[in-house]
Amino acid sequence: MDLSNKVLSATLRRARILPKDALTHRKADFIPQKPRNLTAGDVSNRASFLTRGGAQPTKVEFERLLGTNDLVDEFYLERALLAANPVCRISIRTPSGHERGAATGFMISPKLLLTNEHVFGAAEEATSSIAEFNYRYDIAGRPELSHRFRLRPDLFFFNDETLDFALVSVEQQSLENNISLGNFGYHRLIPDRGKILLKEWMTIIQHPGGARRQFAIRENECINIQDPDVIWYKSDTAQGSSGSPVLNDSFQVVALHNAGVPRRDKQGNYFLKSGRKVKDISDVDDSAVDWIANAGIRISRICACINEKAREKNGHIAELKEAMLGGDVISSAYQSNDQREGVTMSQRPIIQSTNNGNRLILGTLVLELNGNFNLGSSVTLPTNTSVPAFLDQSSQAAETYKEPIIDTNYDSRTGFDINFLGIKTPLPSVVNQSVIARTKDGRKVIPYEHFSLVMHKNRKLAIFTAANVDGSAQAKKPEPGKSYDRDVLNGYVKGELEKWVLDPRLDEKFQIPDGFYTKDNGAFDKGHIVRRDDVCFGLSFSQVQRANGDTFHVTNCSPQRGNFNRSNRHGIWGQLENFIGAQSDKEQYCIFAGPVMLSEDKTFSGTEKVQIPERFWKVVCATKNQKLQVFAFVLEQQLSDLPLEFHVDAEWKPKQLKLKDLEKIVKLVKFPKLYHDADQR
């Protein structure tokens, strides 16, 4: 998050209390074996926090407080995973949906999120913003499925400029997949002082620069606790991110990360971590600055301010006060009989069937779906306990296949809009016109709602698709109060599966029927070429529903392996779709896509013989400063990772290619010169 000069000035004023050597000493100067100069009262008060929530302190924990042992118990790592669940990436957005910055925040009650005032200086700034949970890598270093929630400052908002904190209500259900916010839990705010001692190490869980979740574990040494409002800490390498929780070794929140003292030269220039110097850092993300020391606003002061100044609205303050007494992710883990709503998603869950019912195993952490939380190896669920859909790993067949709601008045379709971006984006041409499957009225390009495609008459697949994408909140949900859930748009009830339909405008002999996929013994997914979410936008619910139904025509389908297609199974195609989809929340895009169809492609014999493409391509067209930018990708199943943001860094660079090289691979498609001129490779 970019810091304002106001925040920097306030921090520098506070830094005057620091002793000169506090900003020059290195953490190596702290020798764990050397006892600290602490009073019995200091140690006694600090030790009392080790039992909060029902924990049983260990010898190592006490020795660490005395400075005679810097080791940690194994449960420290388990607590760290739990403590990360309520921490989220905040996408700070303009009313149009454009992301103007990113920060960190964390839940402090079932409904309230805590972050900095310099992140949300007013309720209006939070209205369009998003809280994204589980934005992290899995154990193999692959992006996990994250869950995005709307902020609701209309329900509750309170901030304080002096202490630089903001509270905002969060929507209870995610934007996608209907995930409950309660799944991620919250951190307990303890209003008492004394949760940290001088020279103790602290942990910061954060999304620096908007990146996936990271831990600054035992890298932040407390160097001053004299300021009534602020705790100072220093690190050689790991700075914090605006709005992050600063935690002690018991993973109790000690402070809200605020800012710090930036390193400067004699001329007053600021040092960045890259080694570059700049005159002003007000427009520089705080994660890029070389900080000498970091400051966090004391949680005890934040609690006192809330108690004194915040006014009740919709029950949020009453719920927060109750949350201060317990029920948080850490204390719930200590007390196996405590009841809490939802589940914690710190690791990928596995559900097993047993003679007595279902069993949910989550690494060494075990959860009962009815809310009981235990540490152990397994939990047996009662036979009447239902398994949430997002955790269900079973492959049981649904009772029926049903066609989604489709507007059969095809005369209403105008297809891909070449003026959608304000810059003309014409369709690519097909090199060999003889392979195009024409519609019954002789057209080569088949229009749908917000997209068009051209079919291959022999391969029965789209040669290319062209889609307009608008991810703005208003376009995605044009009529408030209506549900835009996938099943609602499809017109489905529980137990029904999606049946893809033939396009009546095109002869059946040019289309692979739905039966090929349903009778292939699970060999292939029905892979959307045009992503459903991309084109589900419009001026009305009916237009969104029409676009949704159009994506379920078999003309928009290609056989893809599940581990290539599905993002929740780490499929590279699905992950790229999610990645591009996340960017479309910032601005509008045009996306061209299709399979790479080669004569040597292998043939699968199902209800009919179909050659299966091994590779798929996407070309993303965006605008920046009113100029066209083009990004071209060819994906193969062995690729295993994706970038975090829509820029091409060193890791992703080898996977991007020039548009002219993509044309050589695809062979059938050729893009106009303006796309080559805008190519970003």
Image (cartoon, rainbow, N blue to C red):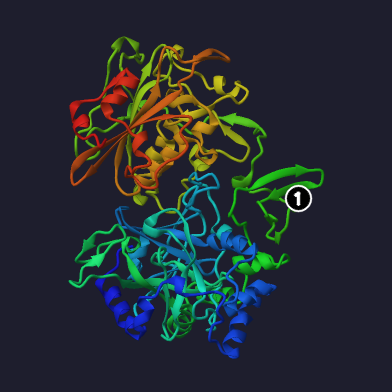
Return the residue nearer the eye: 654 or 410. 654
Q: Image check: 664 left or right of 38?
A: left
Quadrant in the picture for residue 46 = bottom right
Figure check: 48 above or below 506: below
At x 35%, y 86%, the residue is 17
Count of numbered circles in the view: 1
Q: At which x and y percent is residue 3?
A: 30, 67
- For the N terminus, the quadrant is bottom left
Can residue 543 be seen in the rendering of this structure? no
Residue 207 falls left or right of residue 357: left
Image x and y of residue 256, in percent: 44, 72
Say whether residue 52 is left or right of residue 261: right
- The answer to which of 237 and 136 lies nearer the viewer is 237
Residue 664 coordinates in the image, percent (x, y): 30, 20
Q: Residues within 10 Å of mark 1 (few under 14, many from 20)?
A: few
123 lies above or below 396 = below
Element class at badge 1: loop
What residue is pinned by disc 1?
A: 384
Residue at image coords 50%, 41%: 486
Residue plotted at (35% across, 75% down): 24
Dividing the image into 4 quarters, which one contains the C terminus? Answer: top left
In this view, which residue lies farthest toward the top? 434
Above or below, 621 against 131 in this view is: above
Q: Tell me the amino acid under the disc marked 1.
A: Asn
Between residues 605 and 479, which one lies in front from this camera angle?
605
Percent coordinates x, y for residue 612 in the rendering: 48, 19
Which residue, as the protein is rendered here, is positioned at the far right? 355
Above/below status of 640 relative to 261? above
